[in-house]
Every structure is written in C-alpha cells, then in structure tokens.
Amino acid sequence: MLMDSLSRSIKKMKHMDIVENAAMDAEKKAKNDADYRTVVADFSNTVNKLHEAVATMDYKVTSEAVQCLEECMDKLNKAVTAGVVDADTLTGARQQITRKVNPNLEKEWKAYHQKKTKISFSKLDTLGSLAGSPDMIASIKENIAGGGEWAGLTFTDDGVHTRLFLLKESIDQIDELEENLNLSDEIKAFIVKVTNKKAKLTDVTPSILEWIKRESLDDKFVINFMG
C-alpha cells in the first residue's frame, strides 16, 4: 500500500516536471520567435532605407557594405532550422547588424554626404545673397545638415517628408537657383569675392556691370572704403 502510494507520487512528480519543462520550452520558443521578428524587422528597415537612398540620390553601395548585408542575411537564414529559432545564431545575426552593418553604412553615408553637400554649399557661397532670402537659405542649410545622419534618414520631422527627401529637395533647389541666375564663370568669381568682402572696384568689368544692370541688381551692391 505504501509502495503503491509512493509510486503514484513519483509518477505525479514526473508528470509535473514534464508539464513545467514544456511550459518553459514554450516560453523560450515564444521569446526567440519574438526576438527573431524584431531582428528581421530591423534588418528589413535597413535594407529599405538603403534602397530608398540609392533610388533618391546618386548614392552607390560599396562592395564592403554588400558583403556585410549578405553575411547578415545568411546568419538570419541559419538562425531558423526545422521551424525553431536558434538563440545563439540569432545573437550572432543581431551583432552582425549592430556592430558591422549599421556602423559601416553610417560611415559610408557620412562620407558621401560630406562630399555631395560640399558642392552645394560651395554653390550657395558663390550665389551669395542672390540665392534668396536669409530664411530660405537657412532652411536649405538645415535640411542638408539633417540628412547627414544615416540613422535618422527616414525620419519625418514634419510628419510628412523624410530627411532624405528634404536633403534631395534642397540640393535640387540650389541647382535650380544657380541655373535660373545663368551665371558665367566671371560673374561667379565676382560674387565669391563680394561674398568674402574681397571685391575691388577694378573687378567690376564692363560685362559685370552689364549683368548687374540687366538683372536689376543695382541696389544689391554697395561700395565701401577698406578699413
């Protein structure tokens, strides 16, 4: 009788262990599945952002960046075997994204942005006050600066346009301003001197004077004595 009771107790304890382990395994699986979905979503956002940057700008993805992305994709594929997420492999994929993919893209985008916008800022300096109102110029510069960080490239600060869109729009706006003014190299050089306060009376050549009169810019320039 005592042995029968003890046997039943042992069976009951074993059953409880099985139920408890199954519950723990189910909880672990649910967590791994949720982590996998998060990592895949983050990786997809990165790839979509990269696609948008390439489609919007003349941005070229380097072979190094492509290799990092392919390695990450391979790790994500290997993280799931027989319908089960392997936590260690998933951790490796997450580290691939945070330690290699994102830092590499951030570095490459920053270098591209600096080179691309240097030309635009140079054009603004060349155009000087002819480019537009101070508020408009400030807005253009703000939009260009806002597109310098890879992490926030698809943020919509105004709730409508992404920073990438505003970056492209501002660069195009500068190009349009320059094109509409239709400046010769001589006039551009003259404006640069004026902007840097280095223009001399001898720099006002007949062609420069003709351009000033033709564009009705007589009140845009003043003559001062050097201090």
Image (cartoon, rainbow, N blue to C red):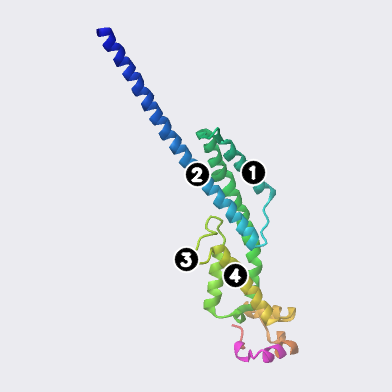
Picture coordinates of residue 15, whole percent (x, y)? 35, 21
- Of mark 4 and mark 3, the one earlier in the sequence is 3
What is the CA distance from the residue labelled 1 to the residue labelled 2? Answer: 18 Å
- Of mark 4 and mark 2, the one earlier in the sequence is 2
Task: Sort mark 4 into few (<14), some (14-19) or many (20+) by Cα contacts within 10 Å.
Answer: some
Picture layout, residue 166 above or below residue 211: above
- For label 1, the SS is helix
- Of mark 2 and mark 3, the one earlier in the sequence is 2
Per the rendered image, the range of residues in magenta is 210-220
Q: Quadrant of residue 73?
A: top right
Instruction: Tell me if label 2 and label 3 are in contact, CB under 8 Å.
Output: no
What is the CA distance from the residue labelled 4 to the residue labelled 3? Answer: 16 Å
Q: Nearer the viewer, residue 32 or 116?
A: 32
Picture coordinates of residue 118, whole percent (x, y)? 64, 66
Which amino acid, mark 3?
Answer: Gly
Picture coordinates of residue 53, whole percent (x, y)? 62, 59
Please give the label number shown on residue 37: 2
Which amino acid, mark 4?
Answer: Glu
What is the CA distance from the residue labelled 4 to the residue labelled 2? Answer: 34 Å
Instruction: Tell me if label 1 and label 4 are in contact, CB under 8 Å.
Output: no
- Where does label 1 land, which residue? 70
Which amino acid, mark 2?
Answer: Arg
Q: Nearer the viewer, residue 16 or 119?
A: 16
| Quadrant housing the C terminus | bottom right
Q: Quadrant of residue 124?
A: bottom right
Q: Is residue 213 shown in magenta?
A: yes
Instruction: Tell me if label 4 and label 2 are in contact, CB under 8 Å.
Output: no
Please give the label number shown on residue 159: 3
